[in-house]
Amino acid sequence: MHKIKIYLIHLFIRFSIKLSSKKKSNSNILLNSNSKILIIILKNKSESLLITPLIKLIYEKTNAEISLIVNIENEIIFSNNPYINKIFIAENDVSAKIFQIGKLNKIKFDIIINSNENYEDNEIFYTSLIKANFKVGFKNIYDKIFTHLVDKLNPATNHFVDRILNICEVFEFEIDKSKLNLLYQPLDNSYEEVDRFLLTVFNSSKMFVILNVSDEIQNNFWGIDNFKKLIKYIKNYDTNIIITSLQKDIENTDKISEGKEKIFFSDDFDKYAALISRSNFIFTLDTFTLQLASAFKKPVFCLFGKSINNELIRVPYISDFDFVRSEENDLSDLHYGKVLNSFIPYFDYVYENFHLNKKNF
């Protein structure tokens, strides 16, 4: 029954595409404050953070009205973004989608941007059926539904952010990346709650280190003993340490802590982001945490598994970082000694800068 449903959805999408085919245009699109733009972003939180520079760039160059179609998972990424006018949650049921599309068509968008380099059913469904004068997307997905096609930059040599920003090549404005970064803005009450928590548990004058032990995306784990050894090493420095993890990893986190280290569970994304913003150094396995560190320009050391494709590693876009990469799909070959050899010089560098800046301040 499930396979039949999927087949029917694909059949409907193909039919929709035939009805909504667009003539191609080589002329750049002129945007202004009266333009209504809809960007479709149905990705996980990590990739959604990587698309925030696109939103900021378009807004700052045009002052256009920007709306998004997102999913339940990534809505939080955009909920406090000052450059977004409206957010719509994508429906799961086909009939609900069609009803939603009918309502969206009443808004009369000027431009729809499909932000995905690859094919995704829901994105194509919305892109093909929502009416707009111009539709922008990457080449070789479903070219017929777009008026403007964007070249895909080589993923092996171009950062994910730069590849997505290539969308702006079809607009009539200059692209200046010099001040762009990922953007996430926690709510004021999240900052307040995190600040109260930190005041109750730490001497604020010490360097604040976060050790994130959870990998939300690949579900990798570095090992209880490895984290214990790393904590022991970091304690040779004048630091405050917090272990962060998802609730699903509570058993491993408790074993790492042994009741001696403070734990902060990261399932509340907004509070977790506020905590990241208050840190001075982050050690992580997870590209989700890595991108948050990038958004707040926090120095970060990351463990990467072997890439399953030929894509450039999604390191921070403009901020300071270092990393070790596994030759395996998991982290099994990243033994403690191998990681420590790379970790020590970078941590020393960050630690020295922290105390130098504190002295100058």
Image (cartoon, rainbow, N blue to C red):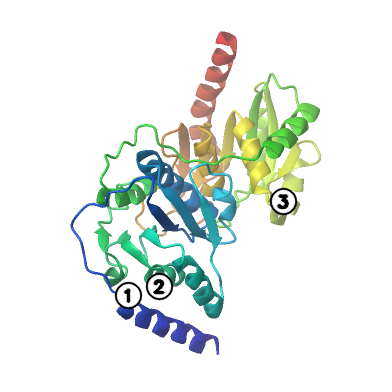
Element assignment for label 1:
loop
| In this view, the mark in front (3 or 2) | 2
Task: Characterize the local packing of mark 1: few (<14), some (14-19) or many (20 or more) Cα atoms within 10 angstroms.
Answer: some
Q: Please say if 236 is above or below 228.
A: above
> Residue 180: image x %, image y %?
40, 36
Rendered image quadrant of residue 248: bottom right
> Residue 19: image x %, image y %?
32, 79
Q: Amino acid at mark 3?
A: Asn
Circles 2, 1 touching at the beta carbon (< 8 Å): yes
Looking at the image, which is closer to me, 349 or 150? 150
For the question of whether residue 112 can be seen, the reply is: no
From the image, which quarter does the C terminus lie in? top right
Rendered image quadrant of residue 337: top right
Q: Amino acid at mark 1?
A: Ser
Is 193 left, or right, of 113 in this rendering? Answer: right
Residue at 70% x, 36% y: name it: 242
Looking at the image, which is closer to me, 78 or 74? 78
Circles 1, 3 touching at the beta carbon (< 8 Å): no
Element assignment for label 2:
helix
Residue underneath mark 1: 20
Looking at the image, which is closer to me, 317 or 35? 35
For the question of whether residue 16 can be seen, the reply is: yes
Q: CA distance from mark 1 to mark 3?
A: 51 Å
Q: CA distance from mark 3 to mark 2?
A: 47 Å
Looking at the image, which is closer to me, 237 or 96? 96
Q: Earlier in the sequence, mark 1 or mark 3?
A: 1
Residue underneath mark 3: 252
Residue at 48% x, 66% y: name it: 104
Q: CA distance from mark 2 to mark 1?
A: 7 Å
Residue underneath mark 2: 129
Q: Amino acid at mark 2?
A: Leu
